[in-house]
Amino acid sequence: MKIVAISDMHGYLKDIPECDLLIIAGDISPLRIQSNTAKMLEWLEDDFMPWLERQLCQKVVLVAGNHDFIFEADGIQEEVTRIFDMYSSWFTYLENETVKIDIDDHEISIFGTPYCSMFGGWPFMYEDDLLADFFKEIPSKVDIIVSHDAPYGTSDVCSEGMAKYEGHIGNRPLAEALENVEFKYLFHGHLHTSNHSAEKLNGGLVYNVSLLNEEYDLVYAPLEIEI
């Protein structure tokens, strides 16, 4: 099975390599409209989902990120669900939950979560005690974890911007939760310029799959792996 993983597109809809499974680890929303509910609904329906449908992949799994206001906005979740349901045969949106994906008789389990450490009034950001409760939903054994945030201490040191002076800036409750989880891969974004090569954590491999740098320029290639 070939997997392509990407994150932090921020509105860039660039075709991805052919694969069996496309994983998107959040921050899909264009910066110019990210907090405009009406325009985001229109973009989801008229641009993002049709773009996904054109990609040469069998299945897609998406989690949200802290720029994806639409997925926490009040009063419109029925509309978001309506849009996603039109593509339910191949598309799955995960919000702190697990799904089993079957591709050509090969089943893999995926846990997806959008929750990030707090540093302002962004979507899906909570204090550590709430994050610890959310991450209790991670199964004790799962093939793939898709987390918008990086676990503290792994793949979480940035090379650009103010973040580069702060050392490890990942999610502590997530790292603590993963001490008791057997997983093969974790794909994250959020920290655009942390290491894009694999880092080991508790027997699994962690990858930053952001496509953009800290200046929101498209500089990184999609991750392609065979499992």
Image: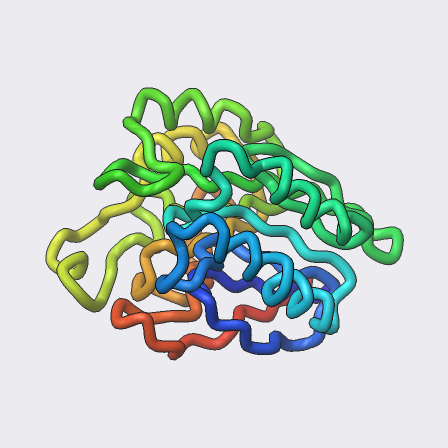
The residue lying toward the viewer, choosing from 90 and 189, is 90
Task: Tell me what residue is drawn at x 74 percent, y 64 percent.
Answer: 20
Picture coordinates of residue 22, whole percent (x, y): 65, 61
Task: Tell me what residue is drawn at x 63 percent, y 64 percent.
Answer: 46
Picture coordinates of residue 172, whole percent (x, y): 30, 35
The residue lying toward the viewer, choosing from 220 and 155, is 220
Badge count = 0
Q: Residue furthest front?
A: 38
Task: Tell me what residue is drawn at x 22 percent, y 40 percent.
Answer: 120
When the figure is inspected, residue 168 is found, relative to residue 136, above or below; the finding is below
> Relative to residue 171, is residue 78 drawn left or right?
right
Q: Quadrant of residue 76?
A: top right
The residue lying toward the viewer, choosing from 227 and 192, is 192
Task: Tell me what residue is drawn at x 48 percent, y 76 percent.
Answer: 221
Q: Quadrant of the N terminus?
A: bottom right
Q: Quadrant of residue 3?
A: bottom right
Q: Quadrant of residue 126?
A: top left
> Relative to residue 223, is residue 91 drawn left or right?
right
When the figure is inspected, residue 211 is found, relative to residue 66, above or below; the finding is below
